[in-house]
Amino acid sequence: MQAEAKVRIGLEVHCQLTALRTKLFCACSSDYRSSEPNEKVCPVCFGLPGTLPVLNAKAVEYAAMIALALDCSVAGRSLFYRKNYFYPDLPKGFQISQYDKAGGVPLASSGHLEVEGKAVRITRIQLEEDPGKLTYEGTIDRSSHSLVDYNRAGIALVEIVTEPDLEDARGAKMFLEKLRSLIESLGVSDGELDGAMRCDANISLAGGARVEVKNISSFKEVEKALNYEILRQRTFSGAASSETRHWDERRSITIAMRSKEEEQDYRYFPEPDLPPILLGAAAVDGVRRSMPEVADSKAARFAREYGLSPQLARELAANKALSAFFEECARLHTGYQEMAGLSVSELSAEDVTGERAVAPADYVELVKMVESDAITRAQAKEALREATRTGRPAREVVRSKNLSAVADEGAIAAVIERVAAARPGSLEEAARDKKAFSFFVGQVLKEEPKAQPAIVARLLASRLRAKKT
Amino acid sequence: MDPLSVKARQVPSLVAGGSLSAEEYVASILERVERLDGRIHAYLQVDREGALARARDVDKRARRGERVGRLAGLGVAVKDNVCVASLQATCASRVLEGFFPPYTATAVERVQREDGIVIGKTNMDEFGMGNSTLNSGYGPTLNPWDASRVPGGSSGGSAAAVAAGMASVAIGSDTGGSIRCPASFCSVVGLKPTYGRVSRYGLIAYANSLEQIGPMGGDPEAVSALFYAMAGHDPRDATTSREPPRGRGGAGLEGLRVGRVREFFGEGADPRVRERVLDGCSRLEGMGAHVEDVSLGSLPHSLAVYYIIAMAEASSNLSRYDGVRYGLPSEKGTADWNSAYARTRSAGFGEEVKRRILMGTFVLSAGYYEAYYVRAQKVREIISREFSLAFKGFDLLVGPTMPVLPPRVGDEPTPLEEYLIDINTVAANLAGLPAASVPCGYEGNLPVGMQLIAPRFREDVLLDAAVALVGEGGAPRPAEAP
């Protein structure tokens, strides 16, 4: 079997700016998900003759935030273009979008997003309006008619196009997840909402033609669709032709839609009803200053300012609420590593923001107890669980449950002997093998949960040395 | 009463003072419409009850001594591509039959706020595409000066209505001359404002980057009042200017530097038209203006540039007429949506509209876009620059509005011949400049109009000049419509 051809995947992500209260070009509410069909429409987004689009300035700001978070360069002057095609979900017969050819300038270009240490290049970012939505009775091929709902028409979309830098389906999924959490951390979109983030993919195997796969409704489906398409192209090696295919979610296959020769001519030209988007250096700086810190730079700062390990800093930064909680605690106490570690492993966003949220001062006291060996980390966790369940202060839990670490080394040494006696040969194994050593410590802690793991380990190590000699 | 016995400019103050009843005045206009419009066909729809109700309301407020608007009592004819809530808006196209917009155009809203009274919606070339008002899906409008002649277009209904005294003033729209051409052929004053001066919200688009709503009428002072009522920034139209409209100096023409544009008097021009416009220039000189010849070398290209851009934009603007949401319903039955669209559009659009959609689609197509659309935009820039340069030496540029006298209804020119007579009007749209047509003489009983073009946002100069040229009495009336 010959070596498998290298796969190149590029993505085109469409992200609704769900944090906007209104649509991109009119004052209609953008909160359409629980509405009756055609309830959230007005003459403008319904495309009635004589109406004109007026740009939502907040949408530009949000799109620029995404662009900056992806290290793109933002165009000082970009243009809206009309993309002309007939389709019943398109009320004007054209979509107002942006374009990078025919003299068009998109909002931003040339960025990147790092995924597992590798940069995925962002080609461009542009603003456009979402079309409406067609629904069918039953399945698309058996329905006698289709129904059209324009509630979604005119919702602000940001399109993010990558270079074909991804190499497999898993990588594509990781990229999308990272992108989603980045966008969420900016507070401009909630990617969890149905249809808020959608994606098209183009896939080519080395030497083969580029195939575009459309209609992928969620990130879960992306992995499936890509794996299917890679397998299909490998199986029919050399047969892949330049075409657009449709992901059929129900049957989990891609179906041919049209070949490259049949591609529509969208007759792009500048939208005469909208002036250019102007984003000068000062405006871009303003956006930058108003941006919440995104996860990657926050993680770097945590590592730098608090000396957290890179792994811990990343995990903490990925959770907005925990990050904020941690920084409050960091003002009260300098045991950064312990505070960060314990919150990442034990606390959720709900635990620090909800009704029964842990107070930073209370948490800091708890951490101090761990640091002074007054309680074990396991006890601290227990106290936190109880505190977040009941809303009582963790310190009070410690007191009422009488939690305290066993500091008596003689008592712990006795437990070690008991465990060794119960499992003949286990001491010898622990001396030879690191894993067995940890397992032994675990057994001791099981017997005596109040023992400090560090003390157990120290005592066990000296016991082993004693045995050798 | 006879509505012609009172000058339009005097109506608002007479109504405000209680010496003229708006209801009586409007009723007399409606009476003329009833008597004359069977023959002229300026209106597609007359809002008799609505107009009278509004007039009564104005009278009531005037009687109570409350403030009434600056256009109080004036009967306003509105071109059918300008939306008025609850009145059908067809753009003279069958494809929009049954479309009642739920909103009123900003320009009309402002007119109504000043107590102008909408008489009805006027005929036009379908979607503004033409200069004769023959291209209407609802039959042609005839010229009140000579019913065998066209009134010009596309705002032919509005021009004919004011010329025949079936409205005090009228609202038109001008994409490449659609206000000025019929103003010239019907001997009224018509003003196309600077691009961005009047809101386009509610104007059903033909070519967005070129067109403006503007005033028309026989009395230049009333035209001026109508213009100032409509002008100004509108948050619903992102292309409107925030610069406030410049008020008129009211000065005479003493010292005004007028450039007679050689290209406007070019070889295609009817010598009789040329003579009358040269007479007009002499009158300007007589009033103290300095008239000099000037040449703008890029003007001969303006027609090709105009048609490429206008058709390109039109092909996109008119895509929405698919019969799905409003207008001409596509027949019920089983068809894929593509053929249903084709059926609606084949039945709904007239020949000229179809021709322009096809040509516009062509010039935007991959492979032709650069050669046509992009190049046209570059030449448009050059034309704009040339005007800016000319305005360093002149306050006003003039020439014949139309190179010909009003054509006969049965002439049936080829499309190209029809396009060619727009040669003098399209440049102002390409450059976004304010331009007016002002009556300046007659050949027999056929009117000749002079076009005046001013620098951006200098409508004040155009209106002052129009007032000076037309004089106190207003434009003459046609004998055909006594």
Image (cartoon, coloured by chain):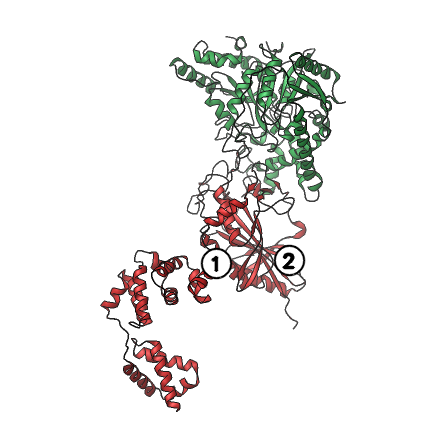
Chain colours: A red, B green
Quick check: A294 above or below B242? below
Chain letter of the residue beneath label 1 in the structure image: A
Residue ID for mark 1: A297
Q: Is disc 1 on the same chain as disc 2?
A: yes
- Specify few, some or many for label 2: CA neighbours under 10 Å numbering under 14, 14-19, or 20 or more: many
> Is there any visible trace of residue B101 in the rendered image?
yes
Q: x, y (%) of residue B44?
A: 56, 22
| Quadrant including the C terminus of chain B | top right
Secondary structure state at the residue bearing disc 1:
helix
Dot 1 amino acid type? Ser
Secondary structure state at the residue bearing disc 2:
loop
Residue ID for mark 2: A210
Question: Disc 2 or disc 1, which is closer to the eye?
Answer: 1
- Specify few, some or many for label 1: CA neighbours under 10 Å numbering under 14, 14-19, or 20 or more: few
Dot 2 amino acid type? Arg
Quick check: A97 above or below B105? below
Cα gap from disc 2 to disc 1, whole angstroms: 35 Å
Q: x, y (%) of residue B135?
A: 64, 26
